Image (tube, helix red, strand yellow):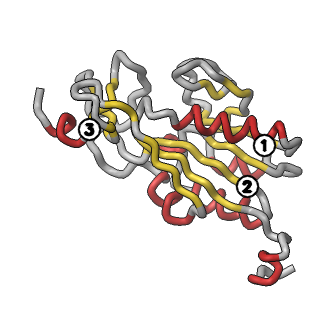
Amino acid sequence: MLFSEQNYRRGEYGGSIEVICGSMFSGKTEELIRRLKRAEIAKLKVEIFKPATDIRYDETAVVSHNYNSIPSTPVNSSAEILLLSADTQVIGIDEAQFFDGGLPEVCNEIANRGIRVIVAGLDMDFTGQPFGPVPALMAIAELVTKVNAVCVRCGCPAMYSYRKVASDAKILLGEKESYEPRCRFCFHVKD
C-alpha cells in the first residue's frame, strides 16, 4: 500500500516520532518512562531499547536518576532495533546520543510502518555542541519536547551539561560526580 495523505488521515499510518531532549538531570528518561508506562496501561505492545554500553544503573533496564525503571533490551546498533521491532505498537529508545548515525533512518522506517517511536537523549554534548543523532531526530520528529534541569549555581533553567572532570573524551559515562546542569551564563563562566 502506498503512503498517501488520505490513508494517513484514515489512521492507516499511525506512526510518529517523538523526541524528548535536554541536558543531564532534566528528566528526559523520567518522561520517556512515563509515556511508555501510559502506553502499557492502554494495553499497547511496547518495546524499549537502550545502548548496550550504558550500564550505569542496570545492564538491561532503563533507569532514571530518580530510580524509576522499565525493562528494556540493550542493543549494539540502531539496525538491531529494526530486527527486534516486529509486532510492536510503541517503541522507546533511551540515550539516543550514544547510538550510531543510522538511528534517524531506523526511526523513520519504523514510524512509516505505523509505529509510535519515542526517543530520549541529550541534544548537546559537554562542550555545548549538537550531540550524535539527536539533532537529526529532532528535525524529522512530529513532536519535540525539550526539558530543562535547574542550574546548580544560580537556580535558573539549565540546558547545558557541564563536565566537572578533566577529560576531552566525547563520550564519558557519568553521573553527578562527573556532570552538573548549568544555565547558559553559568556554563560559559570559567571556574
The first of marks 3 and 1 along the sequence is 1
- Circle 1 sits on which residue? 39
On the rendered structure, is 11 left or right of 167? Answer: right
Callout 1 secondary element: helix
> What amino acid is at disc 3?
Cys
Where on the picture, by quarter, is residue 188? top left
**128 to the left or right of 120:** left
* Residue count near mark 1 (Cα–Cα under 10 Å), binned few <14, some 14–19, many ≥20: some
Q: Residues within 10 Å of mark 3 (few under 14, many from 20)?
A: many
Amino acid at circle 2: Arg
Q: Which residue is mark 3?
A: 183
Q: Residue at x 57, y 25 (%)?
A: 64
Q: Position of residue 137 (x, y in %)?
A: 53, 58
- Residue positioned 64% across, 21% down in the render: 59
The image shows residue 5 at horizontal and vertical percentages of: 74, 82
Q: Which residue appears farthest toward the front when viewing the image?
A: 155
Marks 1,2: beta carbons within 8 A: yes
> Do residues under tags 3 and 2 come within 8 Å of each other at their CB atoms?
no
Q: Residue 11, percent across and down? A: 83, 70
Q: CA distance from mark 1 to mark 2?
A: 10 Å
* Residue closer to the observer: 166 or 137: 137
Which of the two residues, 5 or 105, is positioned nearer the viewer here?
5
